[in-house]
Amino acid sequence: MLAARRRQSLAALSRKRNATVITLIHRQETVSLLGIPLARYIDIDDAQGILRAIRETPDDRPIEIVLHTPGGLVLAATQIASALADHPAEVTAVVPHYGMRS
């Protein structure tokens, strides 16, 4: 139910902003048995989903991407950055808390 509401909210935001809204949000998980924190990072699977969304966006439609992640594989992040740079319409990146760089 939460996922459906999230999709509805993102679709409404996309219509209001007249842009394709893409999110890449990772959160820290806790392994219940050992209590060891396990963080999720950008990986190749994430990149494939983001790249597909960018390719499916018409050339004249802006993209707004929300990145809330601690980083990840350089290859995946580079592929995403390159595809966004190649998109002919305006691209806006929203980083709600902090960004990391190498």
Image: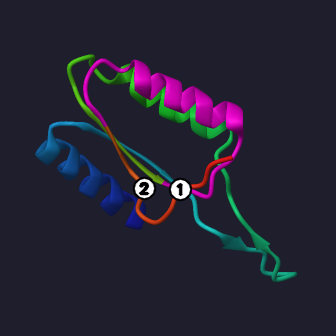
Q: Quadrant of the N terminus?
A: bottom left
- Is disc 2 in contact with disc 1, using a CB cutoff of under 8 Å? yes
Q: Nearer the viewer, residue 37 or 87?
A: 87
Farthest front residue? Answer: 102
Residue in the picture at 27% in, 16% down: 59
x and y, in percent, of residue 35 in the image: 81, 83
Residue 84 located within the stretch drawn in magenta:
yes
x and y, in percent, of residue 88 in the image: 30, 18
Query: Is 93 left or right of 8, judged from the image as shown?
Result: right
Residue 11 located within the stretch drawn in magenta:
no
Residue position for label 2: 95
Q: Nearer the viewer, residue 29 or 42?
A: 42
Is residue 1 visible in this depiction of the protein?
A: no
C-alpha gap between disc 2 and disc 1: 7 Å
Quadrant of residue 89 in the image?
Answer: top left
How many tags in the picture?
Answer: 2
Q: Amino acid at mark 2?
A: Val
Residue position for label 1: 99
Residue in the picture at 58% in, 27% down: 79
For mark 2, give the secondary structure.
loop
Magenta stretch: give its range: 68-91
Residue in the picture at 68% in, 41% down: 43
Query: Is 9 left or right of 29, judged from the image as shown?
Result: left
Residue in the picture at 22% in, 36% down: 19
Quadrant of residue 92 in the image?
Answer: top left
Tell me the crowding category of disc 1: few under 14, some 14 to 19, or many 20 or more residues within 10 angstroms, Cα based: few
Q: Is the residue 69 above or below the residue 83 in the image?
A: below
Farthest left residue? Answer: 16
